[in-house]
Amino acid sequence: MEPKYKRVLLKVSGEALAGDNKTGLNYDVVTEICKSIKKCSDAGAQVAVVVGGGNFWRGRSSGAMDRTRADHMGMLATTMNALALADVLESLGCVVRVQTALQMAAIAEPYIRNRAVRHLDKGRIVIFGCGTGNPFFSTDTAAALRSVEIDADILLKATLVDGVYDKDPHKYDDAKKYETLTFTQVIGEDLGVMDSTAAAMCRDNHMKMLVFDLSRPDNIYDAVMGANIGTVVSE
Ligand code: UDP
């Protein structure tokens, strides 16, 4: 079976990599996620990944610390996750490249768009670390930006709920799930699925996004193959 999406940008939050541990890395979870990514690649899809860092550090939760410095630490946290994902993917037999928005020449390639696309064309999995490389941004915005830059067919946003709801389904029994949405609704109704900078980036650049549940890691593969899961958000 051919994948529905030939080139995807997968956003995995740091939180998702922690599993039940809540912080740090849960290797059982990381391995399941990587197995599903490998299946996508084996099926012929080109997979790029933007990884978050919230399992180690979030700039906006850093209290009195200078925000720019706290965000620098957050970007380092994303790089730790990028290296961990790369390591597990390689152990599964994948060819992987990590590219970081802030230069760390000894441990990863610098982010170079054309080079990233070349890796993808060769079937390599590319993991983007350091978000956008700028403080006051999020890895959701990095995912939106990179998806547009590499001309991905879709941005796959893996979360811990099975789509976008009108209110938190973990708190309200009557929360209603959306099948489809627009980025204008996401921004206007403050739906909390991603920050407004990221949503505006997708909207203004015609990027489509699927929000789906990563507590079943094989949903990554199902999403790439075109299964009807989650909530589709478009312009
Ligand atoms: N960050 C940043 N610029 C970016 C992306 C991330 O400064 O372009 C920092 C910021 O401090 C953020 C942290 O990295 O809190 C981790 O990213 P994020 O909170 O998006 O991770 P997630 O919540 O997806 O795990």
Image (spheres, helix red, strand yellow):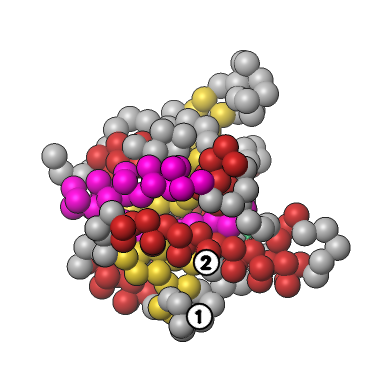
Label 2 sits on residue: 79
Above-or-below relation of 83 to 198: below
Which residue shows up at 42% across the image and 72% down it?
99
Q: Type of residue at label 1?
A: Met
* Residue 52 visible from this viewpoint: yes
Examine the structure image and report whether residue 45 is included in the region drawn in magenta: yes
What span is colored magenta in the figure?
A: 26-54
Query: 123 or 138, which lies in front?
Result: 123
Q: Type of residue at label 2?
A: Thr
Q: Position of residue 60 (x, y in %)?
A: 73, 57
Above-or-below relation of 163 to 116: above
Which residue ends up furthest to the left in the rendered image?
1
Q: Position of residue 54 (x, y in %)?
A: 62, 53
Image position of 211 (left or right of 74): left
For label 1, the SS is loop
Res. 104 mark: 1
Above-or-below relation of 94 to 181: below
